[in-house]
Image (cartoon, rainbow, N blue to C red):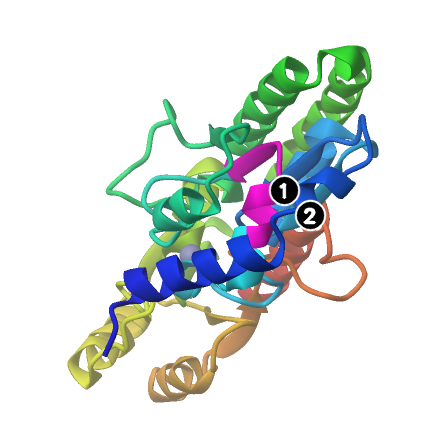
Amino acid sequence: MPSPRWSVVALGLLLLAACSHASSERPAGSLRIVASTTTLASIARGAAGAGPDIRSLVPIGVSPEDFQPSPDTIAALRDADVLVENGAQMEAWLEPTIRNAGNPRLHVVVCTDGLPVVDGNPHLWMDPEFARRYAGKIRDAIVNVDVAHAAAYRAAADAFDRQLVALTARTRAKIATIPPARRTMIVFHNAFDYYARRFGLRIVGAIEPTAGAEPNPAHIADLVRLARAEHVPAVFAEHEYSDKLARTLAESAGGLKVAFLYDDSLGTGAGVDTYVGMIDTDTDTIVSALR
Ligand SMILES: [Zn+2]
């Protein structure tokens, strides 16, 4: 069986043969930004404004932690001016894909570079204060790449920064309505650690301790004990994954609530199709499940 890396190389060669002329069709002046995920694409849209073409490599509803790149992924990287990636080992598939795309004019923004990554957890964007830092890095990169439109990018980034400041304040106010003893969660995977630290929630456990790895029955039994001991009001599943384990856990722990959160990917409905909307929706879900 060929290794995944060799399949990617083969795809790259196929694409090179099929669409070597594609990049010449790009209209002059339109900056092309690709982000690894829909969530980062939304932050990039906030930072860059309406001008650039912005798309995500990982489709909506798919986890960046177990994504398999396709010929479309390589083609998007070949045509892009700027790549926005999270870093902190979230997109393990990205580095060989960038090599295969062979685009010498691609500027790569690694959003978590220089930020305080704790225990290798890559989900810093879930804290709006870190999302502000992501947006600032994206702004700095595109201002360098497309100097002619620098003023418009700075204006867009300033407006977005004000939205994120307001988001932090609004989230803090909503979480403050949960009685302190009930600010305790069990989550699906470690996506909410930075959010919880920022807003004073306590995460006592995750159903999948390692992203993409099926937990064993002993781990679920431990979570049931923890949920009872810590009086956890609710278990949080995620829209992209089966809620089977969350429901089993919630039932075994004495009939806890089960609610659904967004994190690695935006949703498709109105209100969850932007980063700010996603955080607002998650906060409302958390408040109504815990209060
Ligand atoms: Zn994740």
Foreground: 100 or 90?
100
Q: Which residue is mark 2?
A: 22
Name the side, left or right, on which 139 lies relative to 115. right
Residue 279 in magenta stretch: no
Query: Which quarter of the figure is the N terminus placed in?
Result: bottom left
Classify the position of the C terminus by image quarter.
bottom right
Residue 238 visible to an observer of this rendering: yes
Residue 116 x, y percent position in the rendering? 34, 28
- Asked whether mark 1 and ligand 1 are closer than 8 Å, the reply comes as no
Q: 51 or 235, which is in the foreground?
A: 51
Whole-angstrom CA distance, mark 1 to mark 2, is 8 Å
Which SS class for mark 2?
helix
Q: Are marks 1 and 2 in contact (CB under 8 Å)?
A: yes
Give the SS element for disc 1: helix
Residue 173 shows in this picture: no
Q: Which residue: 49% across, 62% down?
A: 14
Residue kind at label 1, given as amino acid type? Asp
Q: In which quadrant of the rendered view does residue 208 lie?
A: bottom left
Nearest to N terminus: mark 1 or mark 2: 2
Please state the total of marks drawn on the protein image.
2
> What is the span of residues highlighted in magenta in the rendered image?
75-84
What residue is rendered at 60% in x and 62% in y? Answer: 59
Q: Which residue is mark 1?
A: 79
The verdict on label 2 being within 8 Å of ligand 1 is no
Which quadrant holds residue 288? bottom right
